[in-house]
Image (cartoon, grey):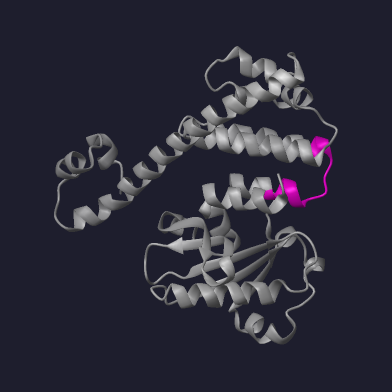
Amino acid sequence: MKTDKLIYSIFQESPETALALLGYDEALSRHYAFQSIEVKEKSYRIDGVLLPDLPDLPVVILEIQFQVDEFIYERILSETLIFRAQNRQFPQTQMVVMFASRNLDTGAGMFEPLVKSGAIRPIYLSEVLNEETRNLGQMLLLLTVKKSSLASDLEVAKTFKEILDKPETPYARKRFFLNLLVNVFLEKHEPLTYQELEAMIKMEEIFDFSNNRLVHDIARHTIAPEIAKELAKDIAKDMAKDIAKDMAQEIARSKQLAEIPALRRFGLTNEQIAEALQLPLEEVQSVP
């Protein structure tokens, strides 16, 4: 998995990770959805857009840069201008270029005034990531950016897994982040194998979605590679459908919970809200 795709995946699942890096209150994440948006002019696709659901919050146009690109500032500006022309409903826009480290930033050139004014914000992950963080997305970013030994990364992975193992962690979210963790480790510490990683931090449950022995056999390379390849395609499709379904349910439930305070302001009782949203009364009562 390419680094930029990995980070976009993290931000899509965990908008609070992106918002925290920008210095925003993580609580705002319930108002943002991270998307990839195609704009019509020259068929541009903006890979990273944090779209708010409140008009007084800014749209964040985000570019991730893990190699030198002297035209990165021009690109984000051109994408933003086209986006603004086609999406006038958003009055505020923040442009962000997220570099792996400061030495990749060759400067904004003629657009430096936009950087000084804050219209474009360069952010250097190697400088803003906190090693004490308990944010899953930031922990993965730290593993990706930081040059570190396998031993120190394993300590991070154990803490990561402890957080995911909490009972309140949704199953789809757990599967998503565990699979990303494996990808990061296997790419960063090549030729580390899955079997070695599994023995170090007990990651077997990544492949244990339905107690399907076949999945375990594929993971351990105990069946012929050519057979495993075809079987893995079919299993991956089924797993992707399950993950998408689980995540859709989690998103729908989060949106329902976010509506509860507004419904109370209109005078509805907890009982009426529970009936309208088809949620357990206890769950509605637990929302402040």
**In the image, residue 251 lies at what x, y percent?**
40, 44
Q: Is residue 239 above or below residue 28?
A: above
Q: Nearer the viewer, residue 35 or 52?
A: 35
Q: Position of residue 245 (x, y in %)?
A: 43, 35
The residue sitting at 69% across, 75% down in the picture is: 73
Q: Nearer the viewer, residue 12 or 130?
A: 12
**Stretch of the chain drawn in magenta:** 141-152
Query: Which image quadrant for residue 227?
Result: top right
Residue that sits furthest to the front in the current view: 42
Residue at (36%, 44%) from the top-left corner?
Answer: 252
At x 72% / y 41%, what residue is drawn?
A: 184
Relative to 246, 115 lies left or right: right
Q: Is residue 195 left or right of residue 91?
A: right
Instruction: State the quadrant of the N terminus.
Output: top right
Decide if residue 134 is in sight here.
Answer: no
Q: How many numbered discs sit on the rendered protein? A: 0
Q: Position of residue 85 (x, y in %)?
A: 47, 78
Q: Main secondary structure of the magenta part?
A: helix
Residue 20 in the image: above or below residue 74: above
Q: Position of residue 215 (x, y in %)?
A: 62, 19
Does the segment drawn in magenta span residue 213?
Answer: no
**Splitting the image into 4 quarters, where does residue 247 fall?**
top left
Residue located 68% across and 54% down the image: 4
Q: Position of 193 compared to 216: left or right? A: right
Indicate yes or no whether the magenta region holds residue 148.
yes
Residue 228 in sight from this viewpoint: yes
